[in-house]
Amino acid sequence: MSLNLILLIGNAGRDAELRYTANGRAVASFSMAVNRSYQVNNEWREETEWFNVSVWGQQAENVANSVRRGAKVFIEGRLSTREYTNQAGATRTSLDVNAFRVINLTRREEGEEGGYGSYPPTPETAQPYGGGQSQQPAQAAPSGQQAGGGYDQPTDGEDLEDLPW
């Protein structure tokens, strides 16, 4: 048995950006910073890990409308690493999270769209991001798409590497 699961709470490094694959599937992406404080010789230090987050399907459209730079965000997903060469010619490693649940933990201001008014959300304010149980009956997925129950993931052959950015 194998398991690849990552849970993160951190801050969005940039606004979520919505794009569409060639076959019309929505994908939102943003960067996320996760900070860790620790003490060395009675001196507090902080380090930051950066993650690239991608979200697929209907949830991507929800995320694009609610996740803004600086927002506190909870992510549940699958971790992958990717090596690339930067402009200076150095080999770098990117931590990528294919998220299947995204919850915006930031309290929104009066009249502002997206996010929750408070956390945990009350049933009246809860927005069904992936993985949550909706009060509405399940509907069949449009032809050519799988019903993901909120866990809308890229299909075989569909990857962020194929997207035009």
Image: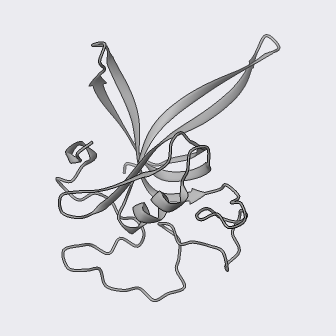
| Image location (x, y in percent) of residue 96 | 39, 40
Compared with residue 91, is residue 17 higher up or lower down, i.e. above or below? below
Q: Which residue occupies the extreme right position in the image?
A: 42
Q: Is residue 150 left or right of residue 145?
A: right
Q: Which residue occupies the extreme top position in the image?
A: 41
Q: Which residue occupies the extreme front position in the image?
A: 111
The total of numbered circles placed on residues is 0
Q: How is the image coloured?
A: one colour
The residue sitting at 28% across, 25% down in the picture is 84
Q: Which residue occupies the extreme bottom position in the image?
A: 137
The residue sitting at 71% across, 60% down in the picture is 109
Nearest the camera: 144 or 24? 24
Q: Based on the displayed image, in which of its 4 quarters is residue 153 positioned?
A: bottom left
Q: Based on the displayed image, in which of its 4 quarters is residue 82 positioned?
A: top left
| Image location (x, y in percent) of residue 61 | 42, 64
| Image location (x, y in percent) of residue 12 | 55, 44
| Image location (x, y in percent) of residue 104 | 60, 57
Compared with residue 142, is residue 50 higher up or lower down, i.e. above or below? above
Q: Is residue 9 left or right of residue 61?
A: right
The residue sitting at 23% across, 47% down in the picture is 163
The residue sitting at 31% across, 20% down in the picture is 86
Compared with residue 161, is residue 143 higher up or lower down, i.e. above or below? below
The image quadrant where one finds the C terminus is: top left
Compared with residue 140, is residue 96 higher up or lower down, i.e. above or below? above
